[in-house]
Amino acid sequence: LALQPENVRKADALVDFVDGSRLEENAEMDNALAAYQKVLNFDPGQAELALHVAALLSRQEDFPRAIDVLKDAIKAKPNEPAPYLQLSFIYAKYLKKTEQALKYANQAVALDPKNFDAYQRLYEIEMTEGDPKKAVQALERAARVKSDDPAFWIRLGKLYASMVFKAEVEPKPEDVKRVNDFFRKAVENAGDDSAVLKDAADYF
């Protein structure tokens, strides 16, 4: 049966994706990127592929193209937080443009307040900028989230603990209590998640 034009394009895009994967496995990165780009030209909203392509381009220090790929993904699917986080990472780590990095990280938080990656990105940016107070504010935003994901609270507890328990500084009792509360929330929501329970037990 003859395929409709739209289905022909989908089939071609799938072929390009498979071809790109094969070329990447063979370390033919330029050709792989060209194949992946054909897929994204057909459907720029393929967020997972866009993230992968942006990461490959970043390794080649082709940041303008990486940014374009991610911005196209955002235009196609503006409610998907992952491309915002990747943009934030590129602007913070490679381009040293803190304002843009914070903007995209905050957009990711607004889109998915229960995604701890976004708060961690804000924390890391502020710490890199030498502003621990603002870094703590990012974690306090996370602490106000109503989440029943035990991994969320474990990650928050570990990150908060990395600030509180410093060898050269005696931790304040209220800060210790704060960290304890995060790990207790993780346990309360852990059920039979052995990895979470082990992390909490190791901490206590």
Image (cartoon, rainbow, N blue to C red):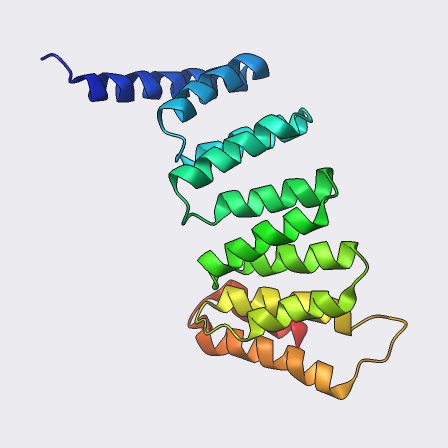
Q: Going by the picture, which residue comes out furthest to the left?
A: 1
Is 125 or 195 nearer to us in this picture? 125
Residue 160 lies in quadrant: bottom right
Q: Is 61 situated left or right of 192 in this image?
A: right
Residue drawn at x 83%, y 70% as measured from the top left = 166
Residue 199, visible in the rendered structure:
no
Q: Position of residue 125 (x, y in %)?
A: 71, 54
Q: Position of residue 118 (x, y in %)?
A: 56, 56
Is 144 or 182 nearer to us in this picture? 144
Residue drawn at x 57%, y 74% as measured from the top left = 143
Q: Position of residue 82 (x, y in %)?
A: 49, 46
Residue 132 lies in quadrant: bottom right
**Count of residue discs:** 0
Residue drawn at x 39%, y 42% as measured from the top left = 77
Q: Is 81 situated left or right of 89 in this image?
A: left
Q: Going by the picture, which residue comes out furthest to the bottom?
A: 173
Q: Position of residue 100 (x, y in %)?
A: 64, 47
Q: Going by the picture, which residue comes out furthest to the right?
A: 168
Q: Is 21 situated left or right of 59 in this image?
A: left
Residue 109, visible in the rendered structure:
yes
Q: Looking at the image, is 75 positioned above or below residue 193?
A: above
Is 156 or 128 nearer to us in this picture? 128
Is 30 or 105 nearer to us in this picture? 105
Q: Quadrant of the N terminus?
A: top left
Residue 131 lies in quadrant: bottom right
Q: Quadrant of the C terminus?
A: bottom right
Residue drawn at x 53%, y 70% as measured from the top left = 197
